[in-house]
């Protein structure tokens, strides 16, 4: 996707669509591990993930453990594993002891994993529109990562807040979630998650007002141009990926 792709074209809709609302009293923290299987050991890795999910069920773990696979980009083949909607304090007293969890991971998956990189993200509910029917992740998600220039975070945040205001004001029919990276990488990193039920949903929607036209309707031409310019001037780099949710590798309580 080119840097203006999502913002300036007809819009579409740690990976994660709606799962931030899955708990009764959700937090805003997404703790994700990016796990790359060893070459030639994808089958063993996936078997290990199923074994790990079964173990969590045996432990009556109340927390879901979601698994996505990266389908495009430099991280193709990397699996994203983690929990969403947590509070920081939840990590101090996990219902399943960390030592037991790590031991089971080593037993089920240790031999098949090449590398693990951990990140923490913070969900931004005030600028997100997950939708009411978003209790579990959709089959695919578009992940757009924005790297904001140093000193430009305020400009970027005010711009996406206005974009969200515009989508609400015009009843723009798209769902999206925003996350900011809290720990584990470059500061000033923001992630836009756009849910898709299938690949056909990636098609442009000719019956829906384009992004720029939506902003113009909400704020007028001059302010719409100002919002887009602030985004352009604050973003240093943008990347996009597609991830696929794997319910058969995930652990979902009660399933």
Image: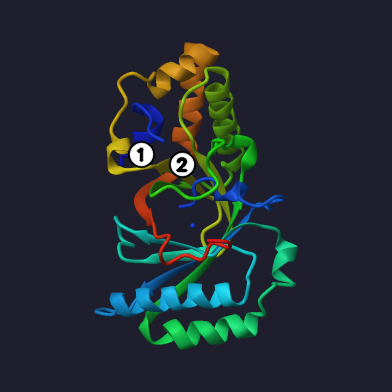
Residue most extreme to the left = 40
Q: What's the mark number on residue 235?
A: 2
Picture residue at 35% right of the left edge, 59% below the top? 70
In the picture, measured across the screen, residue 110 lies left or right of residue 43, that is right
Q: How is the image coloured?
A: rainbow
Please provide percent x and percent y for residue 221.
47, 12
SS type, badge 1: loop
Picture residue at 33% right of the left edge, 80% below the top? 44
Q: Using a 10 Å C-alpha cutoff, classify the residue at mark 1 as few (fewer than 14 neighbours), some (14 to 19) or many (20 or more).
A: some
Residue 169, by quadrant, is: top right
Q: Nearer the viewer, residue 187 or 1?
A: 1
Are the residues at dot 1 and dot 2 in contact (C-beta closer than 8 Å)?
yes
Q: What's the mark number on residue 3?
A: 1
Is residue 23 depicted above or below 10 in this figure?
below
SS type, badge 2: strand
Picture residue at 51% right of the left edge, 66% below the top? 251
Position of the N terminus by quadrant? top left
Q: Is residue 76 visible?
A: yes
Is residue 228 depicted above or below 169 in this figure?
below
Picture residue at 30% right of the left edge, 21% below the top? 206
Total marks placed: 2
Is residue 249 depicted above or below 233 in this figure?
below
Q: Nearer the viewer, residue 108 or 205?
A: 108
Q: Using a 10 Å C-alpha cutoff, classify the residue at mark 2 as few (fewer than 14 neighbours), some (14 to 19) or many (20 or more).
A: many
Q: Earlier in the sequence, mark 1 or mark 2?
A: 1
Please provide percent x and percent y for residue 136.
51, 50
Please provide percent x and percent y for residue 207.
33, 18
Foreground tag (1 vs 2) = 1
Give the alpha-carbon distance from disc 1 to disc 2, as whole Å. Answer: 9 Å
In the picture, measured across the screen, residue 58 lies left or right of residue 76, that is right
């Amino acid at each position: 996707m080119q840097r203006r792709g999502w913002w300036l074209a007809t819009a579409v809709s740690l990976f994660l669509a709606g799962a931030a609302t899955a708990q009764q009293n959700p937090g805003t923290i997404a703790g994700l591990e990016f796990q790359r299987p060893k070459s030639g050991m994808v089958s063993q890795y996936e078997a290990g993930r199923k074994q790990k999910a079964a173990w969590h069920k045996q432990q009556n773990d109340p927390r879901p453990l979601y698994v996505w696979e990266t389908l495009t980009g430099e991280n193709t083949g990397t699996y994203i594993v983690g929990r969403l909607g947590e509070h920081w304090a939840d990590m101090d007293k996990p219902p399943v002891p960390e030592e037991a969890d790590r031991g089971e991971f080593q037993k089920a998956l240790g031999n098949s994993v090449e590398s693990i990189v951990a990140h923490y993200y913070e969900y931004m509910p005030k600028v997100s529109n997950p939708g009411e029917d978003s209790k579990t992740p959709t089959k695919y998600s578009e992940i757009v990562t924005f790297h904001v220039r140093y000193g430009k975070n305020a400009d970027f945040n005010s711009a996406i807040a206005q974009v969200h205001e515009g989508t609400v004001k015009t009843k723009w029919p798209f769902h999206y979630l925003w996350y900011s990276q809290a720990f584990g990488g470059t500061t000033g990193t923001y992630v836009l998650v756009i849910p898709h039920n299938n690949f056909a949903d990636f098609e442009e929607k000719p019956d829906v007002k384009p992004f720029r036209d939506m902003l113009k309707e909400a704020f007028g031409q001059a302010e719409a141009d100002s919002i887009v310019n602030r985004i352009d001037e604050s973003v240093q780099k943008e990347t996009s990926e597609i991830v696929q949710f794997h319910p058969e590798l995930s652990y979902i309580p009660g399933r």
